[in-house]
Image: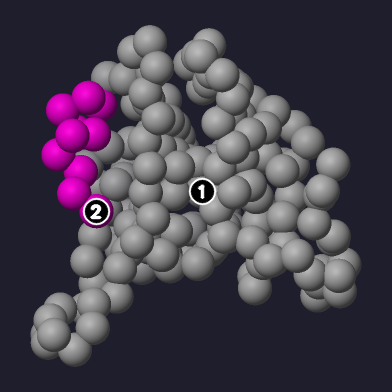
Amino acid sequence: MNMMALRCRGDIVVIDAGVLFPGHELLGVDVIVPELEWLVDHRDELRGLVCTHGHEDHIGAVPYVLSELNPPVYATGFTEALIRRKLEEHRLPEKPDLRRMRPGQPFELGCFKVHPIHVTHSTVDCAALAIETPLGTVIHTADFKIDQSPVDGKLFDLH
């Protein structure tokens, strides 16, 4: 399960919202979702949810986040398509605010400036994040592998 919040000067950005698949010791439990109580308590500060790639441990809890909160969700094209499909399955009453992020095109969320960086992984259209804050830059790599022959032909952005 992956989910991280950055908070600075009254602004919160959440990175990924994944589920955890329990082992045999939790018989009958299909998935474990992140605890959202703190985010619900600070909903007025939430500026967005940024998803790095489309694996369940990174986007599986997006419907649960959107059922409690309704932040804009930023994702690359393929990840956005997977999120849309997942939201259709959950039949949420409100239309989500999904926004396309593109590597090399930074965007601002409150006091944060998010720079998506293309990385390769076992799925396509993945992003690491360089997040500028007033206190310094946070590098969030998420999951990646350096692949010299990715199926989509897009190499890892090492620069």
Alpha-carbon neighbours of circle 2 within 10 Å: few (<14), some, or many (≥20)? some
Element carrying mark 2: loop
Q: Are marks 1 and 2 in contact (CB under 8 Å)?
A: no
Element carrying mark 1: loop
Which sits in the foreground, 11 or 99? 11
Task: Give the extent of the magenta segment.
Answer: 34-43
| Residue 68 position in % (x across, y down) | 22, 42
Q: Circle 1 sits on which residue? A: 51
Q: Circle 2 sits on which residue? A: 34
Q: Check the image and name the residue furthest to the front.
A: 136
Alpha-carbon neighbours of circle 1 within 10 Å: few (<14), some, or many (≥20)? many
Q: Quadrant of residue 14?
A: top left
* As drawn, 26 above or below 153: below
Magenta span includes 70: no
Assign the C terminus to one quadrant of the image: top right
87 sits left or right of 38 in the view: right
Residue 44 visible in image: yes
* As drawn, 129 above or below 9: below
* As drawn, 23 above or below 108: below
The amino acid beneath tag 1 is: Cys
